[in-house]
Image (tube, grey):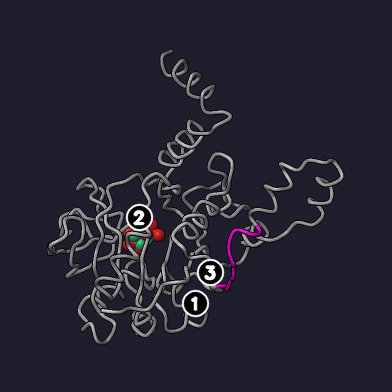
């Protein structure tokens, strides 16, 4: 089977960030620092590392700081140049050169499915990736490139799955699956957004990485509001899972067993900061020594 190459990614970033108030009252949640960079920078780097350097941000009111972060800041560059601070100059220029960043505004927060639909014009008729900014995938355990390989082999759409404790499944999209010949690849037969624990078809949760067939756009246009009155991407995937391959249907899951941090959750956010600080070439050794003493007290 030959399939079109994936070249573009979409990063929905229009959410209100209510889980992290008051920190996110005036600052977009995507701009909260995770150690020494804003959360969204890690997600953009992950996309680029998988070969997708055309990045579309689905932005919204009050999110200008995100676009500024990936743009030049000439005034700051002039100050750093005058000071001869080449190191910091390189740092502020690097984020502007990281990727080809585009943005479109969602206008109304009508759900993740609606946010993805905003990408229709930019993406056109190619398959594309979606990366949710709340989910940080550890660079030591990358998953997006593997998902692109699954798409190349199976076609259709590919989602990332993670086994979670049974009582947590109602926080996620959840799937019914059938095995394939490959241990970590499954065929997705059914999806449901945030089911009550007792009704969940499995303990496999949908994690915020997707490779979608462009057929998703037509499906999203016809998808009625679902859980929470929002247009859910999970519901569109449920429709795709039942559609024939010739029509762009079929959903395959890649089971991920690496490290993922949910930066919208305070405990998981702290774990991400500590993990990255502990690995930092300049600070790591001192930080880890301090942390050992601190936790021993
Ligand atoms: C979204 C999706 C959900 C998925 C989750 C992963 O939910 O709707 O299916 O499991 O991301 O993080 P949210 O966390 O935005 O409510």
Q: Quadrant of residue 150?
A: bottom left
**Prevalent SS, magenta region:** strand
For the N terminus, the image quarter is bottom left
Residue furthest to the right: 82
| Residue 137 colored in magenta in the image | no
Tag 1 residue = 118
Label 2, on which residue?
143
Which residue is label 3 attached to?
54
Helix, strand or loop under label 1: loop
Q: Residue at x 51, y 83 (%)?
A: 121
Asked if the magenta segment contains residue 98, the reply would be yes
Q: Is residue 266 above or below residue 222?
A: above
Rate crowding at label 1 as few (under 14), some (14 to 19) or many (20 or more) other CA atoms within 10 Å. many
Q: Quadrant of ligand 1?
A: bottom left
Q: Position of residue 75 (x, y in %)?
A: 82, 54
* Crowd tier of the residue under label 2, counting other residues whose Cα lies within 10 Å: few below 14, some 14–19, many 20 or above: many
Q: Earlier in the sequence, mark 2 or mark 3?
A: 3
């Amino acid at each position: 089977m030959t399939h079109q190459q994936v070249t573009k990614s979409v990063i929905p970033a229009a959410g209100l960030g209510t889980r992290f108030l008051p920190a996110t009252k005036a600052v977009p949640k995507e701009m909260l620092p995770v150690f020494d960079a804003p959360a969204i920078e890690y997600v953009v780097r992950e996309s680029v590392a998988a070969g997708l350097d055309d990045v579309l941000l689905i932005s919204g009111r009050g999110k200008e700081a995100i676009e500024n972060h990936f743009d030049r800041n000439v005034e700051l560059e002039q100050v750093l140049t005058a000071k001869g601070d080449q190191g910091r100059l390189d740092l502020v220029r690097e984020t502007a050169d990281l990727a080809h960043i585009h943005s479109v505004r969602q206008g109304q927060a009508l759900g993740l499915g609606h946010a993805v639909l905003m990408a229709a014009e930019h993406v056109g008729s190619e398959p594309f990736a979606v990366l949710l900014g709340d989910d940080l995938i550890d660079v030591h355990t990358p998953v997006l490139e593997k998902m692109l390989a699954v798409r190349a082999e199976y076609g259709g759409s590919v989602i990332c799955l993670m086994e979670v404790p049974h009582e947590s499944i109602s926080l996620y999209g959840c799937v019914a699956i059938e095995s394939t010949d490959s241990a970590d690849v499954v065929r997705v037969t059914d999806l449901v957004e945030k089911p009550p624990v007792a009704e969940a078809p499995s303990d496999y949760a949908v994690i915020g990485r997707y490779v979608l067939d462009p057929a998703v756009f037509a499906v999203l246009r016809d998808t009625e509001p679902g859980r929470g009155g929002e247009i859910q991407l999970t519901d569109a995937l449920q429709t795709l899972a039942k559609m024939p391959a010739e029509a762009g249907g079929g959903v395959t899951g890649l089971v991920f067993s690496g490290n993922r941090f949910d930066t919208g959750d305070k405990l998981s956010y702290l774990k991400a900061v500590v993990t990255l600080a502990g690995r930092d070439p300049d600070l790591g050794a001192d930080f880890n020594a301090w942390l050992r003493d601190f936790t021993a007290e």
